[in-house]
Image (cartoon, grey):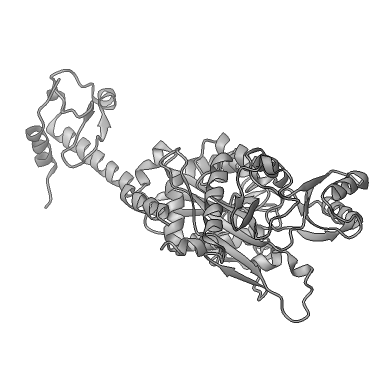
């Protein structure tokens, strides 16, 4: 039924009694067609000089035009989709994976209620606005080649953040590794006051550095793997030799894992044997510019790797992390494959098609171990101040290890009747490819790709008062309850 402006105004006068000459609800002028205030009294006063008991200053025509204008503005605001800025790429070697994650996210969040704008940060830290079609280019090299002709490039990161502040409501960073998970992009967004999905800059910086994270975990009473830090141009093998001996490792053939401290979960990770080989591989990572901090860890024999997705289901700023069913990573060996080379879950096995890895969700662990992993991951998430979502990797060790249990009195978390649990890596922006751990584990509690990504974005919106109106409270509540029951 169509209501004329004059009829609408008549209904307004007849349905609402006036106090001080103005229909009020909590101090706001209320329209009978809406359930919430549409304009405050001060705003009307500035435009129309409303006086006490003086409605005569409004002509019927002017009043109707005001109501119609406000109604149209309200409907436009309520109908406007949430504007999401999807940022991918980055300077790390994982930017190809970042592109894959961004394609997957774009596939599953674009819709009537979400409008996605795409942005790319290249290896030289230049930011570009790109089309959604361009994001489907095949490789980083191919992608970068097309930037000059197809993208809009920003002169600086400052200009980029100014654009974001004016053009999007919230940013979804999908940059893996450096600049994406180390707090770099988060700090830029915080300085510009732009809401974003994920953990804050200071917490990212702490958790992304594997050495610092290990120190923090140990401080909180978590079981950790003994480690040694090679930093800068350190080529002195004396201290490393002492560390080998103190951890019952043979200085000539003792097996360790060498990994960059700040290069993601799998870039540059290798196995080394003895002090000399360890130093050579550590210094190679430093000289190649992968990282100037390299972590050396005792190689854990007889353990099984796992990874767990943690989601924050707390209201607003209240943290209430829930861990989904973890995934067991099973390394498989075929034919004459080199067992030592296959002994780690490296970049190639994680991201490229292979028969050398099998995934089991839930893991084939005893129930007390699964419960301990879930509880420990959620506790770690909370103690490190993480937000929205994260992926936490670790090992289940069925046989007690003398090395790991040497500081038994300090261990508050990680021991079960069935074995020991050690957490090793915190991934602030988990991979979001079509078959990623995030989607594997979410599917076990009935979440589609779109459901879980939408839930993560909604939770991030809850931290911003201006964006809370975009959150479907009923669907949000159901999603949270569903995860809490998982």
Residue 162 visible in the shown view? yes
In this view, the residue in front, 456 or 117, is 456
Q: Which residue is situated farthest in the left direction here?
A: 14
Give the left or right position of residue 14, taking residue 282 as reference.
Answer: left
Can you say whether 29 is above or below 226 in the image? above
| Residue at 47% across, 54% down | 116
Q: Quadrant of residue 341?
A: bottom right
Task: Pinpoint residue 300: horizontal percent, then vertical percent.
Answer: 74, 58
Q: Which residue is situated farthest in the top direction here?
A: 52
In this view, the residue in front, 122 or 317, is 317
| Residue at 18% across, 28% down | 24
| Quadrant holding the C terminus | bottom left
Give the left or right position of residue 387, taking residue 47 as reference.
Answer: right
Q: Which residue is situated farthest in the front direction here?
A: 417
In this view, the residue in front, 28 or 229, is 229
Image label count: 0
In this view, the residue in front, 461 or 125, is 461
Residue 293 visible in the shown view? no
Task: Pinpoint residue 445: horizontal percent, then vertical percent.
Answer: 43, 61
Task: Pinpoint residue 183: horizontal percent, then vertical percent.
Answer: 63, 42
Q: Quadrant of residue 412?
A: top right
Give the left or right position of residue 144, taking residue 7 as reference.
Answer: right
Task: Pinpoint residue 109: horizontal percent, then vertical percent.
Answer: 45, 58
């Amino acid at each position: 039924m169509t209501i004329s402006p004059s009829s609408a105004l008549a209904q307004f006068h007849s349905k609402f009694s006036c106090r001080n000459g103005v229909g009020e609800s909590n101090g706001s002028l209320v329209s009978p067609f809406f359930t919430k205030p549409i304009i405050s009294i001060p705003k009307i006063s500035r435009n129309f000089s409303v006086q006490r008991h003086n409605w005569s200053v409004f002509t019927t025509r002017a009043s109707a035009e005001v109501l119609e204008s406000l109604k149209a503005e309200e409907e436009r605001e309520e109908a406007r989709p949430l504007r999401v800025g999807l940022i991918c790429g980055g300077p790390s070697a994982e930017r190809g994976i970042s592109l894959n994650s961004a394609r997957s996210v774009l596939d599953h969040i674009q819709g009537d209620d979400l409008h996605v704008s795409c942005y790319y940060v290249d290896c030289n830290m230049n930011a570009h606005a790109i089309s959604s079609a361009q994001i489907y280019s095949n490789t980083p090299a191919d992608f970068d080649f097309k930037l000059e002709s197809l993208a809009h490039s920003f002169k600086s990161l400052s200009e980029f953040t100014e654009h974001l502040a004016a053009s999007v409501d919230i940013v979804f960073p999908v940059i893996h590794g450096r600049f994406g998970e180390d707090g770099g992009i988060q700090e830029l967004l915080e300085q510009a006051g732009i809401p974003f999905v994920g953990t804050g800059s200071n917490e990212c910086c702490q958790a992304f550095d594997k050495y610092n994270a290990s120190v923090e975990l140990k401080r909180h009473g978590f079981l950790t793997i003994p480690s040694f830090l090679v930093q800068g141009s350190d080529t002195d093998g004396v201290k490393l030799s002492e560390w080998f001996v103190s951890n019952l490792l043979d200085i000539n053939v003792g097996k360790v894992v060498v990994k960059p401290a700040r290069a993601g979960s799998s870039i540059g990770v290798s196995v080394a044997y003895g002090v000399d080989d360890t130093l050579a591989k550590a210094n190679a990572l430093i000289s190649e510019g992968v990282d100037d901090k390299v972590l050396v860890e005792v190689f854990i024999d007889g353990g099984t790797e796992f990874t767990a997705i943690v989601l924050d289901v707390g209201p607003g700023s209240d943290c209430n992390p829930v861990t989904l069913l973890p995934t067991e990573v099973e390394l498989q060996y075929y034919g004459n494959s080199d067992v030592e080379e296959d002994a780690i879950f490296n970049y190639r096995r994680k991201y490229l098609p292979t028969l050398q890895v099998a995934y089991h969700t839930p893991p084939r662990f005893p129930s007390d171990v699964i419960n301990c992993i879930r509880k420990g991951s959620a506790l770690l998430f909370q103690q490190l101040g993480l937000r929205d979502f994260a992926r936490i990797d670790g090992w289940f060790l069925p046989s007690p290890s003398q090395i790991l249990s040497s500081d038994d009195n300090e261990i508050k978390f990680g021991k079960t009747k069935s074995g020991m649990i050690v957490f090793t890596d915190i991934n602030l922006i988990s991979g979001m490819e079509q078959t990623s751990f995030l989607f594997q584990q979410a599917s076990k509690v009935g979440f589609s790709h779109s459901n879980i990504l939408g839930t993560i974005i909604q939770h991030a919106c809850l931290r911003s008062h201006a964006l809370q109106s975009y959150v479907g409270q009923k669907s949000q509540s159901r999603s949270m309850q569903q995860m809490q029951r998982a």
